[in-house]
Structure formats: C-alpha cells, structure tokens
Image (cartoon, grey):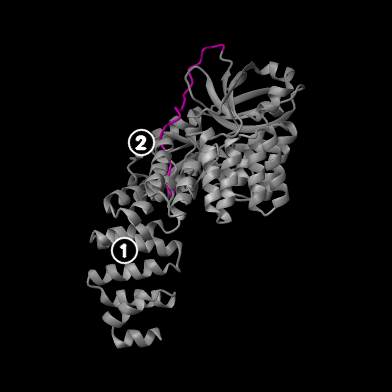
Amino acid sequence: MFALSVGRCRLAWSCCLRGWAMGLLMWMCVGASGQQLLEVINQTEKAVVAARAYVLGGQLVDEGAGFFISADGLALLPASLFYYGDSVTVELRSGRTYVVNRILQAHAFANMAMVRVANPRNHTFTYLLPSREMFVENQDVLVYSHPLELDGGFDAVQLGRVSHQFYLKRQARVRSGISERSFGAPVVNVRGQCVGVVNAWDDTRPSLVQNILFMNDSLWFTVNKATRQMRQSQALRDRLSPDLNAAMYYLSLVDYPESARYFSRHLKLFPRDGVAYALRGHVRFMYKNNFGSREDFTLLSQLNPNDYLLYYLEGVHLMREKKYAEAQSSFTRSLAVKSDFAYALVERGRARVLLKGDKQAAFDDFTAAIRVDTTYADGYYERARLVLQHAENNQTALGDLSRAILLDPNLPGACTIRGTIYLALNDYRAATRDFDVALVKDPLDRYAYFNRGVAFYNMGMSERACVDWQRAVELGYSKAADYVAAYCSAKVRKQGR
C-alpha cells in the first residue's frame, strides 16, 4: 500500500522506489506534483509534536500528539494531558523539547486545548494554519501520528464514512496504524491544508478525523492559566476530562452502550450538565433503555425545563414513533429557544412534509437549515426531495442533491433520486453512473434497476435494459413487468419466469 511505502521511503529510498513511484502517481492524479507532495510532507512534519504529561516527581502518565499553529509557539494539544498531568512537554521531530507554560482555551467536546510553549530563545516554529476546507468521504489525506506510531510518522489514506455529529459537526472514519497515543495529530490534504485532527480512543475500532472546523465554533472556554497553576484548581482541571469526547466518539461509531458509559463518567464530575443528560438520554433510547432515557429527560427538565436539546430529542423520538404532529410541536419549541439549530429545522421540515401540511413552510425550514450550517447534508437532501415532489424544478433539485451527495454519499436513495433527474434531463450516461453507485450501496434497490434499464434502452442497449427490468420485477416492482412485456423478447420473459 502507498500508506506504508511513502513512510518507509523516507527511511530507505533505495528499498522502495517502486512503491514511492506508485504512491506519487496516485497523488499526482489528484493534482499534487511530486515536489508539492514532498513540500507538504516536510512542512507538516516540522510542525507536529509528541506531547507528554507528567505528575510531580517526573512520572509519565499520558501521551498524545499535536502541532504548532503559530510561529511564536501557539499549539493545539489534547486537553486531557492537563487533566492527568501536572506538567506537559512537547517534542519536535528534530528532538528539541519545550515545556508548555500556559493553557489558553479548551474545547471539551473535541478534547483539544490551545496552549503556549515556553520559548526562551525566541525560536521560530514551523506551523500549520487550521483550514476552513471541508473534507469529504474517500478524500486522500495524510494522517500524522505520534512519532513512535508509524514508519516515517504518517500514513496516506482515504477518509472513510463521514458523519455529522452534535457539537463536533463533520467526522470521518479512518483505518490507519495509529492508536490513542496519536490523539491530536494533524490531518492534511494534498495541498498541505490542515483539515482535521486525529481522534483515536480504541485500538480495535476505527479512528476518527475531527474536522478542524471546530476551531471556529463557540464551544471553546477560556482557561488562561499557567500549567503549574492547574493543580490548584480541581474544578477547572475537571473540565479538561476526556470523558465527554470519548462519549461522542462512541456515539459516532453507533456504540450506544459505551457512549452512555462515558456520559455517566462525565456526569459524576458534572452532575448538573444538562447537555450530557440530554445526550445520555438519547443514546439510552437508541439501545432501548427506555427507563434510563426517561429518567435522564426528567432530570434535564428539572435542571432546565426550557432546554432546546430536550425538546429536539423529544421530537426525534416522537418521529420514530410516527407521532408527527407532536414531533413538529417539539421541534417548534426547540427552535423557540434556539432559532439557528439546524437539526431541529430539518426535522421540523420533515414532520411538515409527512403531515402533508404547509409545503412552503417545510421548504423554508430546509433553506434556513442550509443557511445555518452549509456542511449538513440533510438540509440539501430534504429540500431536493420536496422540490422534486411538488415543484418539479429539476435543476434546483439537481444542485441540492449533488451538494448533499458530496457531503454525505450514504444518504438513503440519494444517487437513485439524482439518477432519475439526469434521466429526465436526457443525460443517460450520468444517470447510469448514479444508478451503478446506488446499486453498489443497495443491491436490492428496485427503482435503480428499473430506471437504469430505461437509461440503457435510450442508449440503444436493449438487452441490458431488459435484464435490469427483469431484476426489478423480481424485486417486486410491478411497473417493470409492463416494460418487459412491451420491449423485451419472449426469451427474456421466459428466463424471468
């Protein structure tokens, strides 16, 4: 694999020239020249650090990774280093070591802290600027690591499934040879832009890449303490616990019981954290612990009876029970508290569509969600479906679906729907490409078979059309039987029987 060949080539060029050439060719195919790739590798590795936390007496208690974000010594590191340790050092790949002397801000959901290192000699650090670039599924990236993790200190991989999560927005799964010791290491694209950080909790599970967009949200809290002062404030130190991030990690991996366990650990430190009660109540509901879920929502309603997350999750659960009118009311209450909550806007729009109510109001909800969060695929997806059903504006729907598929190619039926739009626009090749993708994702998609058959027929491929129509019949789509009878030979009809 290219992932290993590049790292090893940095240690022994003569041993893997062939692997380097193959890897370089792959990167050139996405627009990066060999020289550009080398510059990305060299610049990034100079900014990456190994971070170590020690208790008084010098015992190592925790490790992580991070990187400089300014030339004068600002860096991003895992916040939990300061929860476990009394002092923290960072070591560059060159072997130079620096002491972290101040914690400026922290982000509990991301488990990241912005710090300043002591720099008595006014050293100028190589640094990475967090990018506003959004990553997408199957994108080629370089995942850096703790220097003891990987040959050469990085891995070249494709991002896996992308999800959109509460409080962290976009996250991507990634398979790489890294462990939790690499938590906090940067992830860069082929242009050298830092698009994410490594979130690794469990060596037996996929790691996650947290989109660096969390740098720009409002969930950071001010610390502004010298590292040595942290041991004097246990309450502040507790806010740097990694439990909340671990709960979100397992929630992203759909391991609801493990997520609930970490929310419980967090709540032992912060028994009045309404957000944690809401999210634990949600994950308990998802693994059918209905008693525990109700208990959490009751506790939250006592802490904050007008909590927007409480109303939203109440609505989500009502949607699952097909109580759409009650769900719509819950989403409206949520939005009365927090009007820019994209999740609630999308769900209220869905409820309105399912109730066959005000279509314009549903359209406005989806549009508002897109305006609030341009990275949330569901807003584009639902608006496209609504437009197709009630306005028949193919070009508008095509634009929304294309954006939705870019953001989340796993939305149910998205490629099939876009394929039907291409079919209506007489772009048969584009239609068949989408139906091909749809059938890879769902081999039982009878609508994709039927519509691909229509596209094939219009391209003069009648035999392939008949095979697809016959398969649609076998999957229970009766309309396809009319096409088999009208356009296919007796031989095909007999084979179908």
Q: Which mark is residue 479?
A: none
When the figure is inspected, residue 482 is found, relative to residue 110, above or below; the finding is: below
The amino acid beneath tag 2 is Gln
Q: CA distance from mark 1 to mark 2?
A: 36 Å
Residue 228 visible in the current orientation? yes
Residue at left offset 33%, top offset 84%: 492
Q: Position of residue 35 (x, y in %)?
A: 35, 36
Classify mark 2: helix, strand or loop. helix
Residue 478 vertical position relative to residue 319 in the rendered view, above or below: below
- Identity of the residue drawn at 45% across and 57% down: 412
Quarter of the figure with residue 302 = top right
In the rendered image, residue 135 lying in the magenta stretch gets the answer yes
Find residue 57 and report its image quarter: top right
Residue 135 at x, y percent in the picture: 43, 41
Which residue is identified by label 1?
432
The segment highlighted magenta reads 120-139
Q: For the residue marked with disc 1, what is the amino acid? A: Thr
* Crowd rating for badge 1 (residues with CA inside 10 Å; few <14, some 14–19, many 20+): many
**Secondary structure that dominates the magenta span:** loop
User: How many residues crowd around disc 2 within 10 Å: few (fewer than 14), some, or many (20 or more)?
Assistant: some
Q: Is residue 410 visible?
A: no
The secondary structure type at the circle numbered 1 is helix
For this view, does 119 lie left or right of residue 449? Answer: right
Side of 430 where 24 appears, left or right:
right
Q: Which residue is mark 2?
A: 36
Expressed as whole percent of the image width and height from the top left, the position of residue 486 reads 27, 81
Q: Is residue 193 found inside the magenta-colored segment of the image?
A: no
- Residue 234, how many percent across, how many down? 74, 23
User: Mark 2 or mark 1, which is nearer the start of the sequence?
Assistant: 2
Please tell me which residue lies in front, 412 or 4.
Answer: 412
